[in-house]
Image: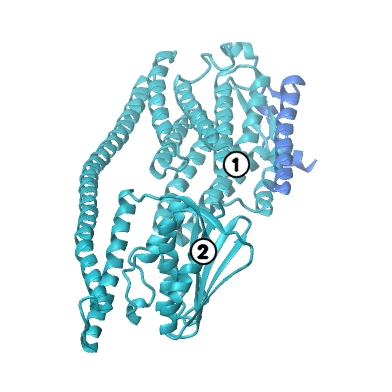
């Protein structure tokens, strides 16, 4: 395998494992998520777009 | 709503609970997970360095993680696990698509793709990888009802979009390659693309339907596409012998069948038993049909092979006995010919010497022709006898150290008279590094030297023949260089074969075509030496040489 391809594979692996780790850290360790007890609390698609804009 | 009021069952070992809609979830998921993981692992272990093997292993591994996550999502009641495994699917699912596209590229082109293309394929994954654990991907957990659903954000929906892009990418590349490919490759492209597309669609089917309709029960049906993909992959491997693991795959299929039947026992509620039994039956019939067809084909091939083998054995025996008969005939005929020939040569020689009185010149000329022809015939008979001895393995070599310079010098001197008669100059030289002692059968080596010089005289119309004896690093080399007709590389390649003669036939130079064949056998097989010929081409002369180890 070429060295550049090797680096690419390492970068991608780090990115994937990092993403999984952050997900684990956020949701399982920190329990950082919102709970919607009522349907009114759930943002609709427009709200989601406003989240992105923010 | 309070989770407690939903009455969710507490999952044992993450995945075993009554929270699932039906036992079909376990059935469809485990039947996909276990065989695909085993097949992926087997393919990887078969050739860990093979690129296709690695990619397929990565796909089956990620697929297994995805399937496991899905079971957790169906069965587990804990909200943090729901969030984590949901995000895990958001991360993994597009990667499986990207890897499938990579696999199709490598499968069709049989080569790795460029770094630029790898980057281009991967860049689409970056948003989901970066934002998977944020509110952009998963907004929160919906407790407004008891459905245990995560509210998905735009990044998750973007993930579905790039999955569609990957599917179209695969289709476009496969269709383009299909039209450029040969017949056999076309079949492979068609089958593997259909298999991959079917797999990818069935993978996302449940999630996409669930996301857009909030009906996750329908999505379960799509999950049966996964075991079908695994079966399809196995079929591809058997049909095209893709990873050379045909026998393993048959074992895996039989194992899967056992697992399928066994899993029925562990289904906690049998409300879906009809579907389970129907699915199992379809699988058994399909697998049974494939296996019976395969066994039938193998048996037919084996029977054909057995018949061929018996025929071959018979033919071989016949050939051996014919070859033995031929050699015996040659030997017998040569012996029978040799005795009268010796008498003819002896008496004609005596007639020519005048032992039976004076004869006229006309009579002398006629008798000389008889004498020369008989000698030629005698040489041919001698060659034939030697060939039959060699082929019977009966050639005996009486090896003693002898002076190679004297043997070759004497022969050159004897034959110089014949050369002079033809107007040729025959010289003998050494490189002055005497003694030139070799350990060998002097008579047979003399026969080879005689053959070489005699050939040079025969095939040289004018000019000279130079016999040179030299020594280099323990090897004694005798080369006979002439200014004769030379030869083409094609003739040179065939010259030392049985019954081969340069352009001698055209020149009517005579000879049995066995002399050089015998020379090669005597020097190379009998004395571990070397023989050869060098020539720059037709009419450029040639140099015959032999090399023997110094004693």
Residue displayed at 44% across by 32% down: B227
Q: Colour of chain B?
A: cyan
Residue displayed at 45% across by 36% down: B245
Left or right of B349? Residue B54 is right
Which numbered tag is attached to residue B82?
none
Q: Which residue is mark 2?
A: B406
Q: Earlier in the sequence, mark 1 or mark 2?
A: 1
The image quarter in which residue B95 lies: top right
The image quarter in which residue B458 lies: bottom left
Horizontal and vertical percent position of residue B178? 46, 57
Left or right of B70? Residue B485 is left
Left or right of B27? Residue B512 is left
Where B550 falls versus B422 (above or below)? above
Local SS, label 2 = helix
User: Which chain is indicated by disc 2?
Assistant: B
Q: Is residue B134 visible?
A: no
Which numbered tag is attached to residue B160?
1
Q: How much space separates mark 1 and mark 2, taking CA atoms?
A: 94 Å
Residue displayed at 30% across by 62% down: B382
The image quarter in which residue B138 lies: top right
Query: Which quarter shows the N terminus of chain B?
Result: top right
Q: Colour of chain A?
A: blue
Judge by depth and name the residue closer to the eye, B114 or B158. B114
User: Which chain is indicated by disc 1?
Assistant: B
């Amino acid at each position: 395998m070429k060295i550049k391809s090797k680096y690419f594979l390492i970068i991608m692996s780090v990115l994937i494992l990092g993403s999984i780790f952050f997900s684990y850290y956020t949701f399982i360790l920190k329990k950082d998520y919102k709970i919607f007890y009522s349907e009114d609390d759930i943002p609709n698609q427009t709200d989601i777009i406003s989240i992105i804009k923010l | 709503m309070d989770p407690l009021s939903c009455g969710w069952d507490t999952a044992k070992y993450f995945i075993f609970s009554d929270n699932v809609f039906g036992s079909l979830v376990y059935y469809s998921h485990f039947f996909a997970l276990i065989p695909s993981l085993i097949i992926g692992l087997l393919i990887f272990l078969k050739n860990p360095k093979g690129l296709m093997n690695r990619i397929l292993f990565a796909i089956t591994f990620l697929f297994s993680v995805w399937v496991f996550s899905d079971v957790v999502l169906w069965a587990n009641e804990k909200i943090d696990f729901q969030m984590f495994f949901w995000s895990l699917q958001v991360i993994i699912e597009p990667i499986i698509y990207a890897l499938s596209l990579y696999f199709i590229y490598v499968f069709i082109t049989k080569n790795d793709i460029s770094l630029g293309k790898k980057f281009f394929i991967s860049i689409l994954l970056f948003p989901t990888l970066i934002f998977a654990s944020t509110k952009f991907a998963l907004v929160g957990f919906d407790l407004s009802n008891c459905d245990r659903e995560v509210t998905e954000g735009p990044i998750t929906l973007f993930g579905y979009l790039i999955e569609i892009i990957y599917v179209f990418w695969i289709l476009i590349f496969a269709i383009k390659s299909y039209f450029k490919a040969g017949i056999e490759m076309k079949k492979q492209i068609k089958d593997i693309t259909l298999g991959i597309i079917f797999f990818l669609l069935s993978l996302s089917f449940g999630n996409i339907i669930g996301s857009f309709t909030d009906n996750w029960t329908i999505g379960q049906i799509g999950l049966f596409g996964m075991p079908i993909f695994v079966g399809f992959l196995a079929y591809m491997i058997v049909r095209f012998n893709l990873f050379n693991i045909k026998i393993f795959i048959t074992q895996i299929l039989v194992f899967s069948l056992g697992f399928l039947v066994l899993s029925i026992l562990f289904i906690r509620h049998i409300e879906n038993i009809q579907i389970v039994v129907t699915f199992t039956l379809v699988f058994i019939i399909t697998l049974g049909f494939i296996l019976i067809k395969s066994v039938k084909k193998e048996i037919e091939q084996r029977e054909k092979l057995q018949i061929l083998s018996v025929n071959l054995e018979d033919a071989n025996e016949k050939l051996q006995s014919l070859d033995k008969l031929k050699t015996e005939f040659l030997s017998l005929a040569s012996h029978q010919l040799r005795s009268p020939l010796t008498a003819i040569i002896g008496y004609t020689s005596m007639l020519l010497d005048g032992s039976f009185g004076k004869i006229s010149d006309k009579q002398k000329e006629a008798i000389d022709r008889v004498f020369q022809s008989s000698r030629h015939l005698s040489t041919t008979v001698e060659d034939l006898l030697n060939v039959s001895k060699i082929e019977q393995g009966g050639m005996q070599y009486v090896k003693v150290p002898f002076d190679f310079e004297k043997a070759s010098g004497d022969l050159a001197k004897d034959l110089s008279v014949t050369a002079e008669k033809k107007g040729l100059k025959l010289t003998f030289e050494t490189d002055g590094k005497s003694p030139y002692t070799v350990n060998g059968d002097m008579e047979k080596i003399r026969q080879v030297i005689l053959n070489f010089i005699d050939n040079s005289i025969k095939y040289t119309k004018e000019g000279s023949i130079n016999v040179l004896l030299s020594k280099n690093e323990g090897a004694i080399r005798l080369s006979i260089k002439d200014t004769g007709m030379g030869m083409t590389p094609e003739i040179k390649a065939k010259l030392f074969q049985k019954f081969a003669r340069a352009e001698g036939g055209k020149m009517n130079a005579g000879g049995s075509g066995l002399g050089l064949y015998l020379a090669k056998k005597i020097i190379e097989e009998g004395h571990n030496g070397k023989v050869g010929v060098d020539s720059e081409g037709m009419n450029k002369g040639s140099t015959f040489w032999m090399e023997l180890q110094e004693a």
